[in-house]
Amino acid sequence: SPLPAEGEANFKLVGEMTIHGVTSELTWDVAATFAGDTVTGLATTSFPFSRFDMSVPSVFVVLSVEDNIRLQIDFRMKANE
């Protein structure tokens, strides 16, 4: 179906991501704004290091590292006609 010509929408985007050769499904929370042929927004997700078979970093000078990776994507898309 066509995208809205204007307004805002919040939705979830589900897809696969590959990091260090490990593929896992991630769900992104998206807040989008529609204006004519342009969509802008912010997508965020978080997951533990173990999801992609990674270890929590351990560095002597750092007291602790949270076992949670947070990713954020600011996007701007324009229709290609």
Image (cartoon, rainbow, N blue to C red):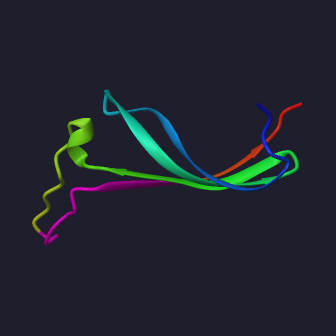
Q: Position of residue 58 (x, y in %)?
A: 13, 58
78 to the left or right of 58? right
Answer whether residue 47 is magenta in the image: no
Q: Quadrant of residue 33?
A: bottom right
Quarter the N terminus occupies:
top right
Q: Main secondary structure of the magenta part?
A: loop
| Residues drawn in magenta | 61-73
28 to the left or right of 34? left
Quarter the C terminus occupies:
top right
Residue drawn at point x = 25 percent, y = 49 percent: 48
Residue drawn at point x = 31 percent, y = 33 percent: 20
Q: Quadrant of residue 74?
A: bottom right
Work out which residue is located at the far front of the displayed protein and give it: 1
Q: Nearer the viewer, residue 5 or 17?
A: 5
Q: Quadrant of residue 67?
A: bottom left
Q: Position of residue 45 (x, y in %)?
A: 43, 51
26 to the left or right of 55? right
Answer whether residue 66 is magenta in the image: yes
Residue drawn at point x = 15 percent, y = 68 percent: 64
18 above or below 48? Answer: above
